Amino acid sequence: MPGVLPVLRWRSVRVTLHLAAVLAITAGITFVCSRLIRVNATTIGFAYLVAILVIATAWGLLEAIVASVAAVLCFNYFFLPPVGTFTIADPQNWVALLAFLVTSITASQLSAHAKQRTREALDRQQDTERLYALSRAILLTEANRTAPKQIANQIAQIFDFPAVSLYDRDTGDIHRAGPEDLRAIDDELHEAAVQGTLFHDEVGQTTVTSIRLGGQPIGSLAIRGSSLSDGALQALSNLVAIALEKVRGQEVASRAEAARQSEELKSTLLDAIAHEFKTPLTSIKAAASALLSGTVSKTEEQRELTTVVNEEADRLGRLVTEAIQMARLEAGKIQLNRSMHSVEELISAVLQQMTAVTEGRRLEVGIASDLPMVEVDPELLQLAIRHLLDNALKYSSPESPLRISAATGERGLMIKVSDKGPGIPERDQSRIFEKFYRGPNTHSRVPGTGMGLAIAREIVRAHGGDIWVESSAGQGAEFCIAVPVTAREETA
Amino acid sequence: MSAGRILVVDDDPQIRRVMRTTLSANGYEVSDVRSGEEALEKLHAASYDLVLLDINMPGMGGMKACQALRQSRHGSELAIIMLTVRNTERDKVEALDAGADDYVTKPFSTPELLARIRAALRRAPSSGPELQRINLEGLEIDFESRRVRLRGREVRLTPKEFDLLRYLVARPDKVIAHRELLQAVWGPDYGDELEYLRVFINQLRKKVEPDPAKPRYLLTEPWVGYRFCPPKQT
């Protein structure tokens, strides 16, 4: 254990020096009184006594007792008749000598005791200040996963401990702090956390205490170089217990919140998928069952219903394809099947597929006449455009016009779909392309899965392009797709 | 002569197309609109017997549209059937609470929808003792003109609410079983839709009881049915 032996050695050297000094002082007083100035025995006794009191106050009891004994011997030898021997002729001098010895030892004891008290009071004051500093630090620490490590660091720093280990029984992690290492007592650390025992190693100056909450050990704390009183140690471990519990409470709360959000997401998603799939199913079921019931007799009506069945079966087919595309995108596998296509044809095909849902809507189409052929995956790019149109249809009032346009620009081919809906608040603009994200006010009113824009973005990115929205509240929204005219090395 | 005038409210054009074709083939006069807002406008201009209302629509949505339709000028005389993909107990109660007479889950078959439409349009025959007028401490019910007045002010009951009230009032102090009530008011195809009774009785209590929380006339007989307790004659 580095650091412990030098401390012990330094202490014994210090005591030896003190004792030498004590003997020197006694010898000095003896010399002065016997050779330099002639004073009576009482004055000499007081001189010794004053010196002993000073020694007791400055250094402690051991030094003071040694000084007392040395002073008694010197007093007897050099000053009490017969001088030069340890014999005492007058029995009164025995009484004086004994009184001197008792007085000096008692005074030393009292003085050393007072000194000890002062030191303890100062220590307690320091402990209290440090505990206060630690409690402030814990309050300011954010209750997250790194909090226990930060607490260990704070303890080492505030209390000036060379080594601190904090064992969190819940996670099984040991958080270490301080320049020295306490790995040697990891076993004791674990034991304290399980059994709740207290371990103290005098030589290594190491203390291990359990951290309890509500009587149950929830971890343990090992510190080296601790001069903390039992009370302070207890207070320290209580503070750490509160901090760990705070972290635990925060984690439980955030897990519960995450679970709740995930549940909410799942149910919203299921609702949306149910709606999307059941809408064409409803038309098919209603039309087919009407035909079967025989209540629809005119050929023209029968034809109308059969057409709906046919179109809605296509729509269901598309929905299934989208779901599969989404699953593929999810798995990170998107295969582009590129070929050269005219932009006009791509857009007309989309409009053709969407006649059923755009029926009755004012739809302006603006396609520049000089557009080059583009090398894209026609099915996927159509799917992306379809999602943008679908989005515009859903989020704008049935009376408002829609516009789809295509032109070339700096970023290659630009396809824009704009609506006159309520617009998208700025804080949502970056999020609407996230999977399953739906605007906060749209859940209950607008059917949808929250997948459309995410699919569109993945497709455009796979083409090496970009997708974004320009909108301000109340002003409608313009979704833009930019794709390079010729294929580049794909990174997607 | 048409079997009734129906307004179809659905944002999906294909569903409107199917409804238009099948309902008119079955003798109804059909109009269709895309949103709740349009339905309200349409109802201002023309009168209808029944509204087929989709719940999940852009704009005001089906629930709000239903409440607004009920509060419109002739709203209390309308029959309203809600169409939706969700079919939990809570969704049904929510739809009935909003003022719907019935609830059909998508996808549905046309014969089923036609049966529901007939049930919603039918007025319960006034079987049993012929009643003309009754007075419940300031609440006056005129069975002939189908009008209800509370302290002189007209209370608007929907046709189904009125039929339910009449059936109970015509049989004072008699416990009417759930099934009997449902079949008498909604029709012979019904019988298990206890939530319909719960919602409609609650709505009736709000309209006719002095303290709906402590009903005095329309009493629940737990597990069995409902009972009308006539006021004490003074």
Image: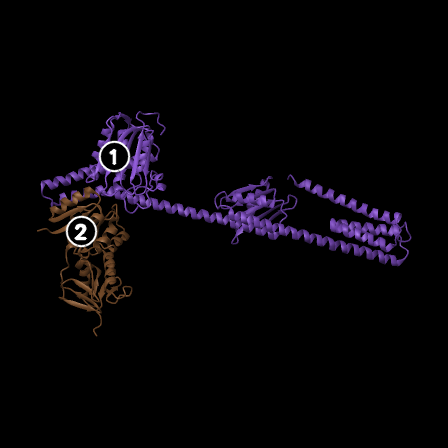
Q: Look at the image and give the colour of chain A.
A: purple
**B71 or B94, which is in the foreground?**
B71
Q: Quadrant of the N terminus of chain A?
A: top right
Q: Position of residue A284 (x, y in %)?
A: 19, 42
Q: Position of residue A226 (x, y in %)?
A: 62, 46
| Chain ID, brown in image | B
Q: Which mark is residue A404?
A: 1
The amino acid beneath tag 2 is Leu
Determine the chain carrying the residue at label 1: A
Residue at the spot 54% in from the left edge and 47% down from the top edge: A137
Q: CA distance from mark 2 to mark 1?
A: 34 Å
Q: Secondary structure at mark 1?
A: strand
Is A214 on the left or on the right of A293, as rendered? Answer: right
Q: Quadrant of the C terminus of chain A?
A: top left
Give the tally of numbered discs.
2
Q: Is residue A80 above or below residue A357?
A: below
**A237 or B12, which is in the foreground?**
B12
Residue at the spot 50% in from the left edge and 42% down from the top edge: A146
Q: Position of residue A224 (x, y in %)?
A: 61, 44
The amino acid beneath tag 1 is Ile
Q: Is residue A206 above or below residue A326?
A: below
Determine the chain carrying the residue at label 2: B
Q: Is residue B112 visible?
A: no
Q: Which mark is residue B43?
A: 2
Is B58 on the left or on the right of A189, as rendered? Answer: left
Task: Identify the image quadrant of residue A481.
Answer: top left
Q: Which mark is residue A73?
A: none
Q: Secondary structure at mark 2?
A: helix
Q: Position of residue A148 (x, y in %)?
A: 52, 44
Whether tag 2 and tag 1 are in contact, CB under 8 A, the answer is no
